[in-house]
Image: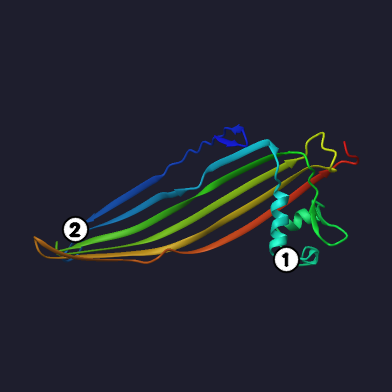
Amino acid sequence: QSNFLGTQTLDGKTNINIPTFAFVAVQKNLPGKWKNGSFSAFLNRANTFHYNMNYSTEESNTSLLDSYLNTLEANNTPWQDLASDDPAYPYDIFLAWNNYLIDINQNEEFYSATGLEPIYQSYQEEVSGAKRETVLSYGANYDDKLYVGAGIVFSRIVYDKNTTFIEASASGDTTTFLRDYVYKFKESTGGLGVGLNLGIIYRPTDNFRIGASFKTPTRYNLDIEFESSNVATFTDTIA
């Protein structure tokens, strides 16, 4: 539940999954002084990224376009940087520039297409994905004196974030031709990682044990993709 400028919004999301699964197999009567060993496979949902968030209001006195103008002013960005083949701010401000939501006046100063009346705003954010781990390990017992084990960890990350932002001018606003615009942004991250675990315990006597373990960092190869769009609607005449 959210409360934004006096407007309450309630939302929820259901996610059903199997978080953990394990399998263990034991070996007995091994050659020599090796007494037994065990192999295990462990599947684990280490993290979940599922959530929804949204809010809306019909009485906002500020616009997302205002933040764009502030960014351009703070960085002294010339309008030519938005009109080049390799534009500045390609995922947001550049799209607003192309849709005439932001333009320049005769003095080459930036201004936005928003009017003077309060506007409708709606923001929705949906995130999905998880981090899953598969661990394959083996351990053995040598003469009840030496215990050794090793495991390899395979990790997979999937993260998707979709946001939708809508602004609409008041129906009676006579200070702008802008009716509304919809800005969407999508971020996708995915990849695989691998790590190694090693352990050893030595028991010289029944009451004394010495142990050591080693764990490597999990190294990931991740692909990150961004996608955005902006659709604006203008009226032919001011209401």
Regarding mark 1 in the picture, which secondary structure is present there?
Answer: loop
Q: Nearer the viewer, residue 89 or 30?
A: 89
The answer to which of marks 2 and 1 sits earlier in the sequence is 2
Q: Give the residue at x 52% y 48%.
A: 129
User: Which residue position is annotated with label 2?
Assistant: 29
Q: What amino acid type should be assigned to the residue bearing mark 1?
A: Asn
Q: What amino acid type should be assigned to the residue bearing mark 2?
A: Asn
Q: Give the residue at x 60% y 54%.
A: 188
In which quarter of the view is residue 90 placed? bottom right
User: Which residue position is annotated with label 1?
Assistant: 76
- Relative to 37, 227 lies left or right: right
Q: Is residue 92 visible?
A: no
In which quarter of the view is residue 78 placed? bottom right
Regarding mark 2 in the picture, which secondary structure is present there?
Answer: loop
Label 2 to label 1, Cα distance in Å? 76 Å
- Relative to 84, 186 lies left or right: left
Quadrant occupied by the N terminus:
top right
Q: Nearer the viewer, residue 130 or 146?
A: 130
Disc nearest the viewer among 2 and 1: 1
Q: Nearer the viewer, residue 221 or 8?
A: 8
| Residue 165 against residue 208 in the figure, above or below | above
